[in-house]
Image (cartoon, rainbow, N blue to C red):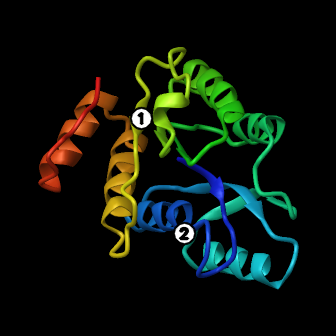
Amino acid sequence: MIVVGFLGAPGRDGELALEVARRAGATGARVEMVGIAAPDAAGDARLLELAAAGIGHATVVRSGADRLEAADLDLALHYLPEIRAIVLVDPEPALIGPATAESGWSGASLVVVSSRAAELDTSAAPQAIVIEPPPNDRDGVFAGLLAALAARLEAGEDPAAAWRATAAALAVDPVSRS
């Protein structure tokens, strides 16, 4: 599986993407991180965190930028073989296209986590699971939910069945907006 997100510095932005990757990796799933890490000691610390958790990070761009470019994501998705699940954490709208194209081509499931979910066009990926995060996740419960869902998707479960099984296993009450 691939988790895409800004890595930020330890203790600041980027915690959700990193925590989803960590928890998914703890299930035994193969996890690759795609994102941006600062080109300084804080970025080094993030890469060491990933390595210590057994998370691949060959496609982490070392940059002072605060977002991943669509071309970087497109390259990463073509470079990493056997993708079954793509998790986009707080993506820029420009990242939806490459992720949708890859999920369509490879049959990978797509999960988009965004507080701006209503603004994102995921119509080209009708099987995509779009989730709005809670305002805060101090205990990591939401990250655990995403990791459990992503692990089921990585194992090859149908997106609808994976969502129902994850919600049932974690006693989550599904809420949806029209």
Image spot of residue 67 (x, y percent): 75, 51
State which quadrant residue 32 falls in: bottom right
In this rendering, position of residue 136 left or right of residue 123: left
92 vs 85, left or right, is: right
Q: Residue at x 30, y 66 (%)?
A: 141
Looking at the image, residue 106 sits to the left or right of residue 112; the answer is: right
Query: Where in the figure is residue 66, as x and y percent of width and height?
Result: 77, 57
| Residue occupied by mark 1 | 130
Residue 24: x and y in percent read 43, 60
Q: Is residue 110 visible?
A: no
Question: Vertical placement of 13 versus 10: above or below?
Answer: above
Between 106 and 178, the residue placed more toward the observer is 178
SS type, badge 1 = strand
- Marks 2 and 1, the one that precedes in the sequence: 2
Q: Where residue 15 is drawn, which disc sits there?
A: 2
> Around disc 2, counting alpha carbons within 10 Å, would you say few (fewer than 14), some (14 to 19), or many (20 or more)?
some
Instruction: Calculate the distance from the C-alpha at mark 2 to the C-alpha at mark 1.
Output: 19 Å
Image quarter (top left, top right, bottom left or bottom right) of the C terminus: top left
- The amino acid type found where label 1 is placed reads Val
Depicted 52 relative to depicted 32: above or below: below
Q: Position of residue 109 (x, y in %)?
A: 46, 32
The residue that appears at 67% across and 65% down in the rendered structure is 7
Q: Quadrant of residue 82?
A: top right
Q: Secondary structure at mark 2?
A: helix
Question: How many dots with numbers?
Answer: 2
Marks 2/1 in contact by CB < 8 Å: the verdict is no
Give the amino acid at mark 2. Glu
